[in-house]
Image (cartoon, rainbow, N blue to C red):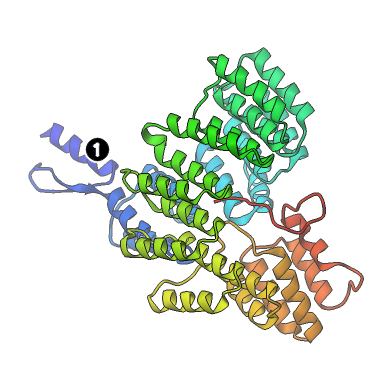
Amino acid sequence: MMLIRSRCKLLKFFGISVSGSLGMCMYTTESVLASLENRVMKVGDPVSPVSSILNQWVEEGREVTYFQLHGLVHRLSQSRRFSHALEVMEWMSNERNYDLSPGGIAKQINLISKVQGLEQAERYFRSIPDAKIGFKIYAALLRCYVKHKSLEEAEVVMKKIKKFHPLDITECYNLMLKLYAQMGKYDKLDRLMLEMKEKDICNARTYAIRLNAYVAATDIEGMEKFLMQMEADPLATVDWYTYCNAANAYRKVHNIEKVTAMLKKSEHLATGKTRRLAYESIQTMYAVIGNKDEVYRLWNICTSLKSFCNSSYISMLNSLVKLDDIDGAEKIFEEWESKYANFDYRIPNLMICAYCKRGQFDKAEAFIKRLLDGGKPLDGRAWDKMACGYHADNDMVKAVEAMKKAVSRNLAGRKPDPITLIACVKYLKEKGDLDLALEILTLCIEKRHISVTSYDGLVSYVHNKTPDTEPLDLIKGDYQMYENGSTQLLNREN
């Protein structure tokens, strides 16, 4: 009897429904976590809150543990639903008063950076008690700085990290290597790699990052020599990704013959669980060099894989858009629409973007209307793409309307296009519609699309308090701009 009761308690701890009397312990096969996950994962709209689902769960008298909520955060993060993952983390602290572990705090820093931006992540970091800050939290902050290409701040944090000696410090070194490569600091990259060799902490990823640096610099000779070293070094894993990167280097110098040779090698090394991701990457590269036959061949292989999922459709649609095969893209979208298990906003967004780039606004508008009529509310990114399209077409009335919808919604960790946002504000100021300009800026600050500094500067600009100021300069701090002065926004996530 004591054994049965102990087992009941253990099952309850892990969230499994238990019932019975006189010590007869009976439990359902579905755990609390699975049931709660089902409810949360069904919320496909990134704007819709999931905290209400968590609250309802508790109001129903059901229990959920710290570990189960962390599992839910992990599942949401894997599905790239970062806003919902962050919402669950905040609910754990605010509603359940859970004291997050250093690992939990590190995860929250990462999510805040993705959803709300670097400034908010730094603010959260400063609120953490000094006694709790250790390697995991510093490593999370380092990832944020690397992601946002904040070189000086990353170097400061890395100095603190070097005082620790955990087994996974190699990953932090690799993050710095990646940052140096992205910033073109090849002298610093080589010095850091030499330091890693002296400490004997290089791994396969270290070599991959160095190879990427040669590719980024379009140093074909250096890349070829290093690739030969990798092929001879047992520490350097040469896999499908290695040759896919080499193919990218040859693509940059328009050596299509060598691109194709590298892609064939890459495909040959794609095995097991990596096949789907490998085929999607290789497929995209074939699209870049204009080889439609190979794109469709790999698509047919992907459709036969057990791991075939939404990402395969995203890859195929991206490839067809690159090939300007809009008819083919429409057919693939229709196939996905008839089969999808989980609605993924990225897929219709790709179609909207494709229509806008081609100036087919009638098609884009009809496409959006059909989605909305079918009960599929759009996220902010779709409206942001529409705003950019209208702006490029010099239809500022519709651009303003779409931008207002964009900034009032969730942008899934991204910010509104800076050029279009500023164009809308500028247009409204010149038109004399200051109220609408300020309304859009207020939505931006409320949804944390821009920083307080940018907001204050733009409000002053709208009120003509800074007449000689270029408004785009006021928000550059919130964006990663190209060093040549171009105002195109760099890719951030995903």
Quadrant that contains the N terminus: top left
Name the element at disc 1: helix
Does residue 165 appear in the picture of this structure? yes
Above or below 12: residue 274: above
Nearer the observer, 455 or 186: 186
Question: Circle 1 is placed at which residue position?
Answer: 10
| Relative image position of residue 394 (x, y in whole percent) | 71, 78
**Disc 1 residue type (three-letter):** Leu
Q: Taking 184 as reference, is 21 above or below it? A: below
The residue at the point 77 percent across, 33 percent down is 185
Which residue corresponds to the image point at 33% horizontal and 53% vertical from the top-left?
Answer: 37
Of the pair 342 and 410, the residue shown nearer to us: 342
Which image quarter: residue 44? bottom left
Residue 243 image offset from top left, x and y in percent? 55, 31
Q: Is residue 176 visible?
A: no
Which residue is the extreme one toward the front? Answer: 257
Residue 425 vs residue 26, the one in the foreground: 425
Question: How busy is the neighbourhood of tag 1: few (under 14 within 10 Å), some, or many (20 plus)?
Answer: few
In the depicted view, which residue is nearer to us: 95 or 255?
255
Give the residue drawn at x 41%, y 71%: 376
Give the image location of residue 139, x and y in percent.
Answer: 61, 34
